[in-house]
Image (cartoon, rainbow, N blue to C red):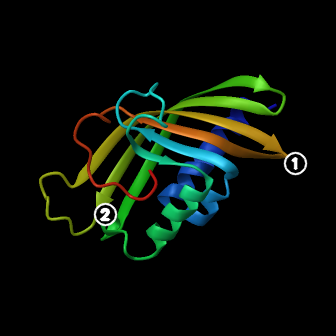
Amino acid sequence: MMDQQQAEQFLYHEVRLLDQREYLQWRELFGSTGVYWVPSNDTEADPQHNCSIIYATGQQLDDRLTRAGSGHFWADQPPIKSVHTVSNVSIEPISDSQVRLFANQVIYLFRENDQRRDVPLEILPATSTYTLSETAGNWQIDLKKLSLLQADGYLPLLPAFI
């Protein structure tokens, strides 16, 4: 069973990989059937039947990763730097080898040489829900749902993964 410190360290590691743009290592945190979901407005809506900002399963995550590394992902040119903060982490056991984590996140985005000098830093508050499974002593993400507070309002250009 995962304890509080392990949960926090897992989440800190995950967002550090995002901040360092270590997307290949970040992808390894997901199981082969892992889902990465950023809902567009109704966080309880079925992503199979409703629009999402990002909804990617195993192969779709790989495709997105390939596009992000290709140099042709225009939304990330110049590259967007990020800093994630994670707080209010809580754990809900599902079984001996599965847990659900809840956390608040604030994501700061900065794009160098952006011509919008009036808003040099974008701030995205969010809640996050993770379902993790333990396999051979390692925890993997089955589902990451990142619910942005302003998902149905203005959103800046986003990196491939937030």
Q: Residue at x 17, y 51 (%)?
A: 119
Q: Residue at x 26, y 52 (%)?
A: 121
x, y (%) of residue 99? 72, 30
Q: Amino acid at mark 1?
A: Ala
Side of 28 relative to 88 (left or right): right
Instruction: Please state the horizontal and vertical placement of residue 9, each as a whole percent of the image.
Output: 66, 43
Answer with the quarter of the image where residue 82 lies: bottom left
- Which element is circle 1 on? loop
The total of numbered circles placed on residues is 2
* Residue beneath the point at 64% across and 38% down: 8
- Residue that mark 2 sits on: 75
Few, some or many residues within 10 Å of mark 1 (<14, 14–19, 20+): few
- Residue drawn at (54%, 45%) of the image: 36
| Residue 87 in the figure: left or right of residue 29 | left
> Front-most of 94 and 19?
94
The x, y position of residue 110, in whole percent, is 30, 58
Residue 136, numbered label: 1
- Name the quadrant containing residue 96: top right
Q: Is residue 114 above or below residue 4?
A: below
- For the residues labelled 2 and 1, the Cα–Cα distance comes to 38 Å
Q: Image quadrant for the N terminus?
A: top right
Q: Residues within 10 Å of mark 2 (few under 14, many from 20)?
A: some
Q: Amino acid at mark 2?
A: Ala
- Outermost residue to the right: 136
The answer to which of marks 2 and 1 sits earlier in the sequence is 2
Depth order, front residue of 128/153: 153
Residue 37 seen in the figure: yes
Residue 115 placed where, x, y %? 14, 65
